Image (cartoon, rainbow, N blue to C red):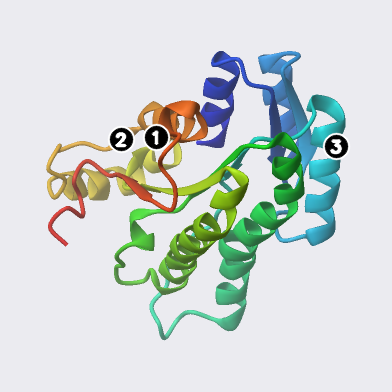
Amino acid sequence: MGAMYARKFVEEGAKVAITDLNFEGAQKLADELGENAIALKLDVSSEENWVEVVAKTEETFGPINVLVNNAGIGIFKTLEELTVKDFELTFKVDELGVFLGMQKVLPSMKKAGVGSIVNISSVDGLVSAPTAIAYSASKHAVTGMTKGAATELGQYNIRVNSVHPGIIKTPMADQPDVEEYLKQLEQDIPLRRRAEVVEVSNLVVYLASDDSSYSTGAQFVVDGGMISDL
């Protein structure tokens, strides 16, 4: 979904630093988007790497006023099957990555005098499900960090919100081995369909923009009503 976010931001006239552990993929997208995009390699669990990425982005485009924390992994196992290694890896990417991103971009946003941080969580950051213990724990943490950061950073004109997607139509989700299962899940969604990636992207761009200038510390759910009765 991150690629679609980048495309939407560039369409809106933003200058974008595309970060990924897979630098080649990020560079390919940056080349496609042109002069308003750069690619940088980033391990979101590395404090040093975050410092480097922020510095390079400032050097290229000036102070940062938007951060989208999008990196995440999901390891879905039962409580008995889940290992400490599984839990620690999920924590490093889904939780520590968000913390470091917010912390390291803060001085740049203070220089800009304005900022919007959009943390991509999940409906599992508000509820949970079987086999989602590690994933749900990390996404609940993102919800908590979003609220806490919003209370701290409002004084600097920096807003912090989280986005909670439900089931999204992605190439990975369209694989034959999961397609039938997802079709069954759609029957429990009031809108009876999965979200298009662009529907999530539109919300992310809205939260980054001045159109949402009085929204902070909030959780924006984009799930077709899937958890509306919970």
- Secondary structure beneath label 1: helix
In the image, what residue type sits under mark 2?
A: Ala
Mark 2 or mark 1: whose residue is earlier in sequence = 2
Residue 200 bears which disc, if any?
1
In the image, what residue type sits under mark 3?
A: Lys
Q: If the image is split into quadrants, where does the C terminus sit? A: bottom left
Residue 33, how many percent across, how many down?
A: 66, 16
Give the residue at x 60% y 57%. Answer: 98
In front here: 114 or 70?
A: 114
Q: Quadrant of residue 37?
A: top right
The residue indicated by pointer 2 is 195
Q: Which residue of the protein is positioned furthest toward the front in this rendering?
A: 155
In the image, what residue type sits under mark 1?
A: Val
Q: Nearer the viewer, mark 2 or mark 1?
A: 1
Residue 145, how many percent across, how many down?
A: 52, 63
Dots 2, 1 in contact, CB < 8 A: yes
Q: Does residue 25 appear anywhere in the picture?
A: no
Task: Tell me: 100 left or right of 1.
Answer: right
Give the residue at x 20% y 50%. Answer: 226
Q: Nearer the viewer, mark 1 or mark 3?
A: 3
The residue indicated by pointer 3 is 56
